[in-house]
Amino acid sequence: MQPNLIVKKSGIAGQGVFTTVNFKAGQLITALIGRRMSMEEMIKTVDAGLEAGSDPLQIGDETYLDLEELYRSINHSCDPNSYISGENKLKALKAIKPGEEITFDYSTTMNDNEAKLLESDSILWTCKCKCGAKNCRKIIDQFKTLPQCRQKFYLDNKLAPDFILKKFG
């Protein structure tokens, strides 16, 4: 368990993760922890109903983390205060104060292999967004579906996991 992070009711969706300390822009908040799994394992797990399609975090072209519950509770925002760096490091995008909910843009971690998904019973995971941000896109989808200006912002500032930066940067 992370001593600086707590799970409680969120105004965005269900439960959220909140900080009890200050974080400066660029500061490491936590490493996201979970069991590594291949795309095939992820598809089987989701198809079997053992995980929701939104639960595994993509960390490579065909590699996922089956996140532990605390990290699974971090909500999406179209105006996030954190981002994924490297493979699984959650860093502050801007200063975050105690009591603030920690959020990241899920779309920055999504670049599923559509061909493999189409071979299974799975579908590409998307979700209606209700984050409430002024710039809300109303949908959470693959990185390539982000508006070009948003993609450029994330890529130019290296505010996405390494596999996204490598593929699109």
Image (cartoon, grey):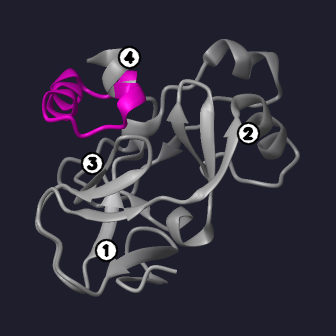
Pointer 1 residue: 101
**Side of 28 relative to 62 (left or right):** left
* Local secondary structure at mark 3: loop
Residue, x 75% and y 54% (percent of image)?
51
**Side of 72 relative to 86 (left or right):** right
Mark toward the start of the polypeptide (3 vs 2): 2
Measured along the vertical axis of the image, is residue 102 above or below residue 136? below
Image quadrant in which you'd find residue 149: top left
Name the image quarter holding the C terminus.
Answer: top left
Our reading of the magenta stretch's main secondary structure is helix
Q: Distance between the residues labelled 1 and 4?
A: 30 Å
Q: Which residues fall within the magenta stretch?
A: 144-164
Q: Given this view, does label 1 or label 2 mark the residue nearer the observer? A: 2
What is the crowding at mark 1: few (fewer than 14 residues within 10 Å), some, or many (at least 20)? many
Pointer 4 residue: 167
* Local secondary structure at mark 4: helix
